[in-house]
C-alpha cells in the first residue's frame, strides 16, 4: 500500500498490508510471550525500556524525518526522546 505525505500528496513509502491471518499470528505470538514477560522482574523491565530509549535516541533523526514525511508533520519535534525518557522513568 502506498503511504502518502499529506502535505505534498507524494508517495513516500510502500508498506505491507496485513490480513486477518497476520493479525491472528501476531496475537498468538503475543499471548505465548505474555507469561514469560509477566514473570520478569521490575529491574529487567526497566532495563528493556532503557534499551528501547537508547535505540530510539540513536535513531531519533531518522524517526523524526519518517514521521514528518509520513504524517506531513513539521520537523520541530525536538526533544521527543527526552519526553519518552522522562515519562518512562517516572513509573
Image: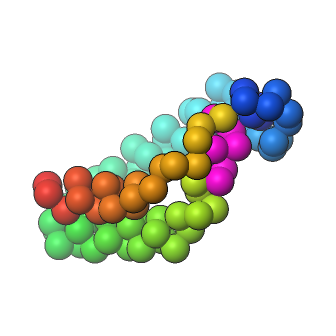
Q: Residue at x 58, y 41 (%)?
A: 74
Is residue 75 positioned above or below 49 on the image?
above
- Of the 4 image quadrants, the one containing the N terminus is top right
Q: Position of residue 71 (x, y in %)?
A: 63, 35
User: Can residue 36 be seen in this snapshot?
Assistant: no
Q: Residue at x 66, y 50 (%)?
A: 66
| Membership of 2 in magenta stretch | no
Is residue 15 positioned above or below 49 on the image?
above
Taking 87 as reference, is 10 left or right? right
Which of the two residues, 2 or 71, is positioned nearer the viewer here?
Answer: 71
Q: Position of residue 90 (x, y in %)?
A: 14, 57
Is residue 54 positioned above or below 10 on the image?
below
| Membership of 66 in magenta stretch | yes
User: Can residue 61 be seen in this snapshot?
Assistant: yes
Report how many numbered discs are placed on residues in the image.
0
> Chief secondary structure of the magenta span?
helix
Q: Position of residue 79 (x, y in %)?
A: 39, 59
Residues shaded magenta: 65-71
Q: Position of residue 60 (x, y in %)?
A: 53, 64
Taking 18 as reference, is 44 left or right? left
Taking 10 as reference, is 52 left or right? left
Is residue 4 positioned above or below 53 on the image?
above
Q: Quadrant of residue 9?
A: top right
Q: Quadrant of residue 46?
A: bottom left
Q: Residue at x 59, y 64 (%)?
A: 61
- Of the 4 image quadrants, the one containing the C terminus is bottom left
Q: Quadrant of residue 12?
A: top right
Taking 74 as reference, is 6 left or right? right
Amino acid at each position: 500500500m502506498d503511504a502518502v505525505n499529506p502535505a505534498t500528496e507524494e508517495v513516500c513509502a510502500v508498506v505491507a498490508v496485513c490480513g486477518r491471518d497476520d493479525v491472528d499470528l501476531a496475537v498468538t505470538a503475543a499471548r505465548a510471550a505474555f507469561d514469560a514477560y509477566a514473570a520478569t522482574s521490575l529491574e529487567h523491565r526497566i532495563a528493556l525500556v532503557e534499551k528501547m530509549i537508547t535505540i530510539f535516541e540513536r535513531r531519533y533523526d531518522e524517526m523524526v524525518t519518517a514521521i514528518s514525511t509520513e504524517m506531513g508533520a513539521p520537523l520541530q519535534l525536538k526533544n521527543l526522546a527526552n519526553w519518552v525518557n522522562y515519562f518512562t522513568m517516572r513509573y
